[in-house]
Image (cartoon, rainbow, N blue to C red):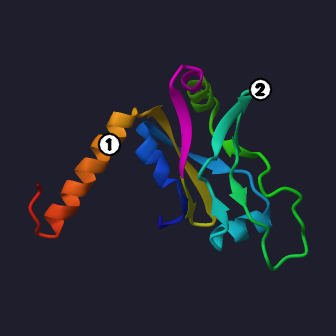
Amino acid sequence: MEQKILAQNKKAYFDYSIGDTYIAGLVLFGPEVKSAREGGAKIVGAYLSFSQNEAFILGLHIRPYSHTRYELNDPDRPKKLLLNAKEIKKLNGVASRKGVSIIPLELFAQGRLLKLKIGIGVGKKNYDKREALKKKSVEKRLRHGESAF
């Protein structure tokens, strides 16, 4: 099935080493889905929260849909994630460890549905980030036919 990426969190790959990834469904209102398909969603800065064996994403901003009379009160409201109980239990256990975060990576459309790709991330140190930038710079130079040094 074709997947169309609606929003990405590119900064997550720079700030974290991403391990396992999961795909979760989202509970949204109709105008939120239409707005996200128009490109009105931002996941940078969003994070997951767990309560009573349910997972929620906080900080996922979906701007109000322009062609509706239906008004949403809060474009940043917590949105429920659709994961099975085993996945929620595992993610909740992983998130409680020090230095580990559950990060939303991308929001995409799969057919009629919107899905969220989330990953288990361990924060990178500053020297790891500098090393990644250096490697990226060398690869860019080599692509353009320049010397690596």
Q: Residue at x 62, y 35 (%)?
A: 84
Q: From this view, report whether residue 141 is shown above or below residue 13.
A: below
On the picture, is 105 further left or further right than 45?
left
Residue at the disc numbered 1: 130
Label number found at residue 12: none
Viewer-proximal residue among 132 and 98: 132
Viewer-proximal residue among 53 and 36: 36
Q: Is residue 98 magenta?
A: yes
What is the number of callouts on the image? Answer: 2
- Dot 2 falls on a residue whose secondary structure is loop
* Residue 94 percent location from the top left of the image: 54, 24
Residue at the disc numbered 2: 52
Q: Amino acid at mark 1?
A: Arg
The region drawn magenta spans 93-105
On the picture, is 59 further left or further right than 5?
right
Q: Earlier in the sequence, mark 2 or mark 1?
A: 2
* Residue 90 percent location from the top left of the image: 56, 25
Q: From this view, report whether residue 81 is shown above or below residue 7.
A: above
| Circle 2 Cα neighbour tier, 10 Å, few/some/many (<14 / 14–19 / ≥20) | few
* Residue 101 percent location from the top left of the image: 54, 32
For discs 2 and 1, the disc positioned in front in the rendered view: 1
Q: Quadrant of residue 33?
A: bottom right
CB atoms at circles 2 and 1 under 8 Å apart? no
- Check the image and name the residue furthest to the front: 149
Q: Amino acid at mark 2?
A: Gln
Q: Residue at x 55, y 35 (%)?
A: 102
Q: From this view, report whether residue 99 is shown above or below residue 132.
A: above
Viewer-proximal residue among 72 and 90: 72
